[in-house]
Image: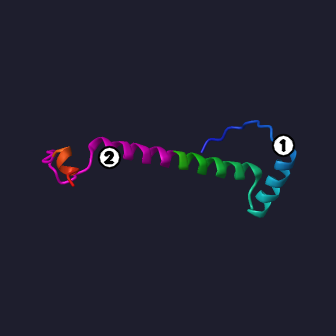
Amino acid sequence: MERQNITIALPKGLVRRARHLAVERGTSLSGLLAEFLDRLVREADKRERAKKNLRRLLNKGFNLGTSGQISWTRDELHER
């Protein structure tokens, strides 16, 4: 996979703690950030697919057993 260098500015304390976390996980700060960003992008893609599927289902509609025909009136439903 082709790599691209970037420059970011982060608080020193955050960088120090993140480096310690990376060492504990046996990776580099760069690897830790790449893993986090990859997960973030995959989750966003997954949410987008779920939204598209939901929109498709809602546009298609659901079978309510009426075959698209309403055989009652509002007044009949609210008779007491």
Q: Is residue 36 magenta?
A: no
Above or below for 9 versus 36: above
Q: Position of residue 50 (x, y in %)?
A: 43, 48
How far is mark 1 from mark 2, CA to CA?
45 Å
Q: Which residue appears farthest toward the front when viewing the image?
A: 80
**Most foreground residue, 77 or 41:** 77
Residue of label 1: 11
Q: Secondary structure at mark 2?
A: helix
Q: Is residue 1 left or right of residue 22?
A: left
| Residue drawn where x is 48% and y is 49% of the image | 46
Quarter of the image holding residue 3?
top right
Q: Residue at x 26, y 50 (%)?
A: 62
Estimate the x, y position of residue 38 in percent, counting from the top left: 60, 48
Work out which quarter of the rendered image holds the C terminus and state it.
bottom left
Percent position (x, y) of residue 18?
79, 53
Left or right: 56, with 72 as reference point = right
- Image position of 54 with respect to 80: above or below: above
Give the residue type at disc 1: Pro
Q: How many marks?
A: 2
> From the viewer's perspective, is the residue at label 1 or at label 2 nearer?
2
Residue 15 placement, left or right of 69:
right
Magenta segment range? 45-72
Of callouts 1 and 2, the N-terminal one: 1
Q: Give whichever of 70, 77 is nearer the camera.
A: 77
Residue type, mark 2 in image = Leu
Marks 1 and 2: CB-CB under 8 Å? no
Q: Secondary structure at mark 1?
A: loop
Near mark 1 (Cα within 10 A), the count class, few <14, some 14-19 or many ≥20, is few
* Residue at x 67%, y 38% (from the top left corner): 4
Along the line of sight, the residue nearer the viewer: 80 or 40: 80
Residue under numbered circle 2? 57
